[in-house]
Image: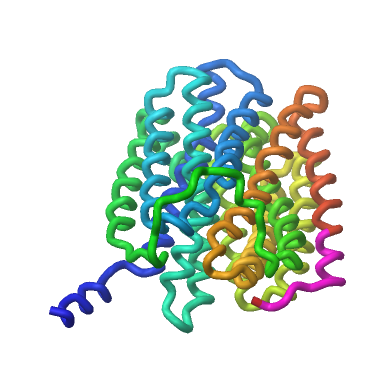
Amino acid sequence: MSLHTGRKQRRRPGYAAAAGVFAIGMAGTTLPTPLYGLYRQELGFSELMVTVVFAAYAIGVITVLLLAGNVSDEVGRRPVLLCALGLSAASALCFLFEGGLPALFAGRVLSGFAAGLLSGAATATVLELAKPGREGRAGFAATAANMGGLGCGPLLAGVLAQYTPWPLALPFLVHLLLVALAAVVTWLLPETVRDPRRPRRLRPTALRLPPEVHGVFTPSAVAAFAGFSLLGLFTAVAPSFVGQTLRVHNLAVAGVIVCTVFLGSTLGQLLAGRLGVRRALPGGCLVLAVGLVLVGTSLAVQSLPVLVIGALCGGTGQGLAFRAGLAAVSAAAPPERRGGTISAFFLVAYLGISLPVVGVGALTLALGLRGAGLTFAGCVIVLVVCVGLYVLRRPPAEA
């Protein structure tokens, strides 16, 4: 009986399956990206409102990270993952039966709730399911699932909306099917938290960092903030720039361009594992700055190829800095507080998605889309260069 149980346990899904669940959950958060133009035509709202709707997602993420960032450390990873998938399905239903701006806001907030739960719990699950000697692969799987999922969302939605009927419905129907599959896989995952228990009452805890991470957290998190600002720009504004300025109205092309920045991020994360934290973190800041220069140049000269190259370069720099920072923070955190510490890291990162992007939307009213994008690029370049110089002088310890 015990031998049979052992074999059954060994057949249970591992960290790769958990990474797949992570990717499906995150894909739902960027699924509406190439569809905002269709919603604008249908509902008649401004570019500023697009960024506000987009930022509602970040508000949902930040709220969950502040109130329940470490809840998976108490109740277990699997219940939190199932809850996140349920919220992702509810978000898809809001868009599927969309009835105006309130439904869009509700869908984005629910999507943010799902991402907030997934960010810490799914990352910790992937890392903890890795067998000895495969920690590096699991670290790449976790960060690649995050960014790869975010990139697959607009690609899937863009292709389905452009080349199939029901452009505002079919992407969400497909996502609901994927979420159902992910829920089955999650149910089969082994629980990695010992002695799960009922949580205490929810209260802001995500920023109560353990002393072990104080030295490495700030530069790593600020670099993540800058990188996520670039991701936010592409997921909120790039499709509008491609359509309004470059006169390219193919939704699949818009989805591919947004996917490119996340593809670069995944490439950067792969390189980060080979370079090590001490080189990947400052190197990522440098490559991110170069990518931002190229993005700004594409806005100035109205060039689609330069925009794609800038997206790939900037995404690579973001991936380098993001994985290096996550690895340093995760390695420094004690196991019993790892979920909450990772959630705090993502909290700072998601501030980068929300605040600068809404600023860009507001600036479009005065400067236009191109002027707002150039202003954004200049500000983030200054920030990322400062972080890069800091970590060159005070490099973090290797994970």
Instruction: Give the residue drawn at x 59%, y 32%.
Output: 56
Expressed as whole percent of the image width and height from the top left, the position of residue 132 reads: 45, 82
Expressed as whole percent of the image width and height from the top left, the position of residue 342 reads: 59, 59
Q: How is the image coloured?
A: rainbow
Expressed as whole percent of the image width and height from the top left, the position of residue 46 reads: 65, 21
Q: Is residue 230 left or right of residue 379?
A: left
Instruction: Give the residue drawn at x 53%, y 69%.
Output: 335
Q: Is residue 302 above or below residue 365?
A: below
Q: Is residue 285 visible?
A: yes
Instruction: Give the residue drawn at x 71%, y 71%.
Output: 280
Q: Is residue 160 left or right of residue 123?
A: left
Expressed as whole percent of the image width and height from the top left, the position of residue 265 reads: 61, 59
Question: In the image, which residues are magenta?
Answer: 387-398
Q: Residue furthest top?
A: 44
Quadrant of the rendered image containing residue 354: top right
> Does 390 lie within the magenta span?
yes
Quadrant of the rendered image containing residue 1: bottom left
Q: Is residue 99 above or below residue 90?
A: above
Of residue 380 and residue 76, the one placed in the foreground of this image is 76
Of residue 255 and residue 151, the one placed in the foreground of this image is 151
Numbered circles on residues, count: 0
Instruction: Give the residue drawn at x 51%, y 46%.
Output: 115
Q: Is residue 268 visible?
A: no
> Does 270 lie within the magenta span?
no
